[in-house]
Amino acid sequence: MKKVVCTGGGSAGHVIPTLPIMEYLIARSWQVVYVGSTSGLEERLVKPLDVTFHSIMTGKLRRYWSMDNLVDFFRVPIGVVQAIRILRKESPDVVFSKGGYVAFPIVFAAWLCRVPVVAHESDVSPGLANRLCFRFVNSLCVNFGSIRAPVPRLVVTGTPMRRALLEGNAERGRERLGFQQNIPIILVVGGSLGALRLNRLIHEALDLLVDEFDVVHVCGLGNVDATHENDSHYRQLEYVDDGWGDILACADVVISRAGANSVVELLTL
């Protein structure tokens, strides 16, 4: 039986595209292991697939001054040591990385352990963590052929999509949200971590919006505003994984932060 170690995290955008790949490999009798951060969404998102999960210590690579940079500087080498131990224990045939700051220790450890790495980059302009990973990657899958990266092999694949998104049902979505049939729905999406400016704008305009619309607001973890919890035409959700296809299907208008995965999901629908 072949084995793959998957990694990526820091936000849901670095995990969600990996889920259909994991489902595909599991259906073909691959053994799948996931390595994520100790404090992110990764374990929650991969748990339904019943795969082995390991967490490692890692540090975020910020491009601005912060005392956290000093602390995180020492977390990265600790994460690399932990990653080496995991790879030696699991002995995978390949590592798949979706990027984010949690990926670097695993990708670097795989290079040290001579385990081939396949990575995926969704954006036209790769983030810092992914750019650091590229030199240790064997194959890079991308959405845009214009990306220039120092990798041996670059393949335009697009973004893997969850089947559940294509099977969304508008009636189920309205039922879940408790909305009536005759009122159009605005879906506001700020990503798993939220978009503070977008959240603020929606709250400021909410009285006007709910006069004509039902509003679903995916506001990000820890960003629920308790003052709006009892509004019958407004639903706040920190994050949605199960049933996301149904909620997308019932939306008439989507206002979204333009994350790569969000844009691809909306284009697919």
Image: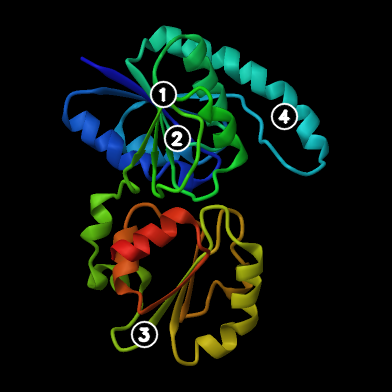
Between marks 2 and 1 in the image, the one whose residue lies nearer the viewer: 1
Q: Earlier in the sequence, mark 4 or mark 1?
A: 4
Q: Position of residue 160 (x, y in %)?
A: 31, 46
Q: Earlier in the sequence, mark 3 or mark 4?
A: 4
| 3D distance between C-alphas at marks 2 and 3 | 35 Å
Q: Are marks 2 and 3 in contact (CB under 8 Å)?
A: no
Between marks 1 and 3 in the image, the one whose residue lies nearer the viewer: 1
| 3D distance between C-alphas at marks 3 and 4 | 46 Å
Q: Quadrant of residue 93?
A: top left
Question: Is 269 situated above or below 12?
Answer: below
The kind of residue tagged 3 is Pro
Q: Position of residue 230 (x, y in %)?
A: 53, 76
Tell me the crowding category of disc 1: few under 14, some 14 to 19, or many 20 or more residues within 10 angstroms, Cα based.
Answer: some
Q: Which mark is residue 138?
A: 1
| 3D distance between C-alphas at marks 4 and 1 | 27 Å
The answer to which of 118 and 166 lies nearer the viewer is 118
Q: Which mark is residue 43?
A: 2
Between marks 4 and 1 in the image, the one whose residue lies nearer the viewer: 1
Residue at 77%, 34% in the rendered image: 69
Between marks 3 and 4 in the image, the one whose residue lies nearer the viewer: 4
Tell me the crowding category of disc 2: few under 14, some 14 to 19, or many 20 or more residues within 10 angstroms, Cα based.
Answer: many
Q: Residue 63 carries which label?
A: none
Name the residue beneath numbered marker 3. 184
Question: Is 89 situated above or below 244?
Answer: above
Left/right of residue 47 with respect to residue 104 in the rendered view? left
Q: Do the residues labelled 4 and 2 touch (CB within 8 Å)?
A: no
The kind of residue tagged 4 is Asp
